[in-house]
Amino acid sequence: MLDIQKIRADFPILSQTVNGKLLVYFDNGATSQKPQVVIDAEVKYYNEINANIHRGVHTLSQLATDAYEVARGKVKDHINAKHAHEVLFTSGTTHGINLVANGFASILKPGDEVVVSSLEHHSNIVPWQMLCEKTGAILKVIPIDENGELIIEEFDKLLSDKTKIVTVNHISNALGVINPIKYIIEKAHAVGAAVLIDGAQAVPHLKPDVQELDCDFYAFSGHKMCGPTGTGILYGKEEWLNKLPPYQGGGEMIKEVTFEKTTYADLPHKFEAGTPNIAGGIVLGTAIDYLNSVGFENIQAYEHELLEHATKRLNEIEGIRIYGNTKNKASVVSFNIDGIHPYDVGSIIDKLGIAVRTGHHCAQPIMNFFCIPGTIRASFSFYNTKEEIDQMVGAVKKAQTMLS
């Protein structure tokens, strides 16, 4: 069992007040809060070993390089990649997805097909639309049902020898639905297609095993898993990363440059042009250490309790509708109240110190499916409590009374 009060003490921001109330932070799907150990690690880097990496023989450069590559190794172990050079540092999930989409521009031809799902964040839709416009490929979409679950039978029908890549999220950011990605990967591979998994919403809650999943690419962000903003990871199978061309040109990603010809560096540097977010990469390793010290089995069990409690309490409110009604979901509750705009509810409960997300959550196709302008999304983390959920429910009831 988790010692929640001890954990909460690790996060300095949770002790502050907002609008005169102790902060209740339920916007973890947008970004997580940071423990003191992560904040300290960022300060330590700039205080002690700030230098550029991979390029200097001086002591600070070597220390920074070593710390950066140790962090890469931590990520490799965390996601169970086969090789450290299959782990690319990026600025976030969006960067990783665009890197792969850009690479597939040299592979796709007119008539080839790209499959996405109706549950995707815009960052896993728009790059593929751009790719299809550039190459003449065709975008196919897996539909969802009223519970917010993918209609797998329809996915099966979409697959053919024209399918070149399937890209879906592990967990929906808007609804919290956990997708059957193992099945999706196996079926896509059966027709020779590659698979990219958007793991941005999954990595705060579970440890993906990329070898067991057998995905070709897995992208995620550091800031949603207690790490710094501007950090992310793209895992790619060695064979695919060798096949794709570089995403950006510049320093670090080259082996030899002449005006006649440039040869590219080996993995992972081929995809890491320029000076990276060195501090961010190192500190992401610290965040992973912290989460593992808490334990992902503990995190999942506790967050499931929070999800059940929130669902039960919110369902007490007359006129409420919760979207994403499935047993297989993460600790996210996305809901509306009849006759009230989600923005209005969010604004009122913010005055009571409660932070939730309102709007379409960069997932407009989902909102269009349900014919709504957006939802109120409460996304929970392991440092939240049932008492905070009760406060939110009380605040929502108060907002309902004021707005009715």
Image: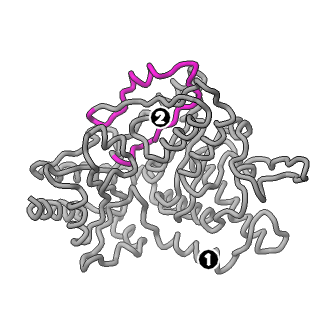
Q: Disc 2 residue type?
A: Val
For this rendering, which residue is in front, 165 or 13?
165
For this rendering, which residue is in front, 290 or 360?
360
Q: Position of residue 123 (x, y in %)?
A: 49, 47
Measured in 3D between alpha carbons, the distance from the residue under mark 2 to the one under mark 1, in whole angstroms, is: 41 Å
Q: Position of residue 183 (x, y in %)?
A: 47, 28
Classify residue 139 as left or right of residue 369.
right
Q: Identify the residue at horizontal 26%, vertical 39% (top origin).
A: 370
Camera sees residue 212: no
Q: Quadrant of residue 136?
A: top right
Classify residue 102 as left or right of residue 203.
right
Image quarter (top left, top right, bottom left or bottom right) of the C terminus: bottom left
Residue marked by disc 2: 116
Mark 2 burial class by Cα count in 10 Å: few <14, some 14-19, many 20+ = many
Camera sees residue 105: yes
Q: Identify the residue at horizontal 34%, vertical 65% (top origin).
A: 4
Residue interval drawn in magenta: 146-174
For this rendering, which residue is in front, 112 or 207?
112
- Mark 2 secondary-structure assignment: strand
User: Which one is earlier in the sequence, the residue at label 2 or at label 1?
Assistant: 1
Q: Which numbered circle lies on residue 44?
A: 1
Between marks 2 and 1 in the image, the one whose residue lies nearer the viewer: 2
Q: Disc 1 residue type?
A: Lys
Q: Position of residue 309 (x, y in %)?
A: 22, 52
Q: Identify the residue at horizontal 65%, vertical 49% (top origin).
A: 87
* Colour basis: one colour
